[in-house]
Image (cartoon, coloured by chain):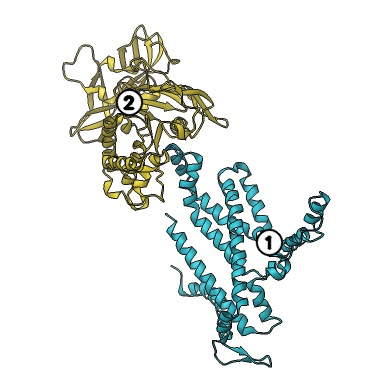
Amino acid sequence: MFSRAYRAAVTVPPLVWVAVFLLVPYALLFCYSFWSVSPAQLIVHSWTFDNYKELMQKDVYLATLFRSAWIAARVMVFSLLLGYPLAYYLSFYAGKRKDLLYQLVIIPLWVSYLVRAYAWKTILGSDGVLNTSLQYLHMTRHPLEFLLYSPFAVVLTLTHIYTPFTLLPIYASLEHIPRNLVEASHDLGASPLQTFWRVIFPLSIPGVLAGATFAFVLSLGDFLAPMLLGGPSGIMISNIVVTLFGAAYNWPLGAAISFCMLGLVLGLLFLSENLEKKWSFR
Amino acid sequence: MASTASEPVSPGTALSANPLLVIRNLAKSFGKNAVLRDISLEIAEGEFLTVLGESGSGKTTLLRIIAGFESADSGEIVMEGQRLDMLPPYKRQVNTVFQHYALFPHLTVAENVGYGLRVAKVPAAEVTSRVENALSMVKMVAFARSKPAKISGGQQQRVALARALVNRPRLLLLDEPLSALDANLRRQMQVELKSLQREVGISFVFVTHDQEEAMVMSDRIALLRMGELEQIASPREIYSRPTTAYTAQFIGHTNLLRAEVNNGMAHCGPLAWAASLPDGPGLFSLRPESIRPAPVIGEASAVRFSGQIRGQAFHGATELLQIECAGGLVLSVRAASRANWEGEVVFEFDPAEAIPVRESPARN
């Protein structure tokens, strides 16, 4: 159909792009993770497993990874709790307002991540909007300190940022449910609640899995929100990676952590992909 | 013939004193578009009623209002003395077989069939046995554990039927359930569906655009035209005594004769026959099979005329001829097949076969 030259012309550039900007850097990073740093802060190009051993032995890395996973899990749950009902309303009940509301969900994605994170800083800070209002209303006497520079602030901010990513796949899967299935369920005597749990929810599971994966994976690797709003107790694994590549100048250890994270995330994606297939019936 | 246009249920189709379902003066519009206008009809216990009409005639909307997926603008539906149209669909003792079956893709065939029983909290053991009975009724027991995507369209059709019937509804609604099947399977399912309906004794309201299907299966046919009930009668009656020009043309094939009535005689081109209509214009339906080649000595009462054969379509046992008579009048005639029709042929028909029909007015 198309000439060989044409096919080469359209396939080669993206392959080259992927090779140069993805595969080569990853390969390089992979090599780094088996090298080490001399006391004189030079990279020693001899192969060793020391970086991976250190990760397993020092509590700080595993503890931070678990804290990151715990934050990511909370973000995932809250994004689902917020995103699902909204997606359900949009798909089934919004009627004429559907397009407008859909745009309102999308618009925050156009605003810079940094702006949204800073916005929370001005809301949650000691003399931020929230604390000032609470004191003005005499509901608290002193500023609530746990609001900012805490895991709470990180979870809140990440939930705000990633809820659209959770909502969109759920919305897409709800939109794909043929409406005559809902009618058939009512016709067979199922109340709206029974219809939701027996027909609508099971058929939206692929979207829920995709949305949950988005929220969890994106939060797990986030470093800006914990950096800006996390404080000492809200440090996440990516902050450690950033420090290792920056101030600490220990690229090999940073690379080893990055590869562990990559493995974990790929595992999660594989799992979620398989579950999604199991729950799709088309 | 005196016009009785305001009476929707024609005489001779009177039902038992206690019909299962009564629809009174139902009307429905979508925006400015009137989809149903003043529909009144009754459905008897155990009756197979077909709602027949072209696309856009409002037949599916009528079905959806009975099922509860749409609400009427005015009018009422009463089932055994109780208002049905006030109930949400899940509280109506009515089940539907959907056009595209609407089987739940995440449930097996058996789970689909058991759905209605399970949401009604029927004990598990009873669900199992009733599902099995329903599946054996439609010969689908072997597929009980299959997912709908793994079975053919005809099989999905049977499962949809079993899923509706297992709930023992008072009334089963079928929305063009055979339209997605190929011709052979379709004919087979028509017969099966009809015998199944007799077996279970549940009233069926069957929606279709296919007049042949309607004729084969129904106890009565309700013909809808642009949201109004054109005629409701048994297949035989609606075919042999159509009341309107539209009915005569939609059900089967007919010759519409636009005649002038004068002193009890109708005149149309070279034809003239006795008709008990008042003087003035009159419209008659004359079925092609009512016209026959005339024997040398015909009956005295028959109307004889001669014409040239202009066209001939072979249908096996019969063929459809186009006859041009004097004055350019062209008539269709269904006659037993014979090899060669040539030149001028003499035909005749019985004047009683020319059925006076009302004009079907154009509507916006």
Kind of residue indicated by mark 1:
Phe
Question: Where A149 sits versus B330, above or below?
Answer: below
Q: Look at 43% across and 15% down and name the residue there.
A: B7
Kind of residue indicated by mark 2:
Glu
Question: Where B354 sits versus B212, above or below?
Answer: above
B121 or B272: nearer the viewer: B121
Q: Position of residue A260 (x, y in %)?
A: 55, 76
> What colour has chain A?
cyan
| A239 left or right, relative to B33 | right
Local crowd at mark 1 within 10 Å, few (<14), some, or many (≥20)?
some
Residue where numbered disc 1 is placed: A152
Question: Marks 1/2: CA distance?
Answer: 67 Å
Local crowd at mark 2 within 10 Å, few (<14), some, or many (≥20)?
many
Residue where numbered disc 2 is placed: B47
Question: Where B34 sits versus B8, above or below?
Answer: below
Q: Look at 80% across and 58% down and name the residue there.
A: A143
| B140 left or right, relative to B101 | left
B330 or B203: nearer the viewer: B203
Chain identity of mark 1: A
Mark 2 lies on a secondary structure that is loop
Q: Are marks 1 and 2 on the same chain?
A: no
- In the rendered image, the quadrant that contains the N terminus of chain B is top left
The part of the image, by quadrant, that contains residue B349 is: top left
A186 or B37: nearer the viewer: A186
Q: Look at 47% across and 28% down and name the residue there.
A: B226
Q: Which chain is yellow?
A: B
Whether residue A38 is visible, yes or no, is yes
Q: Position of residue B176 (x, y in %)?
A: 38, 37
The part of the image, by quadrant, that contains residue B134 is: top left
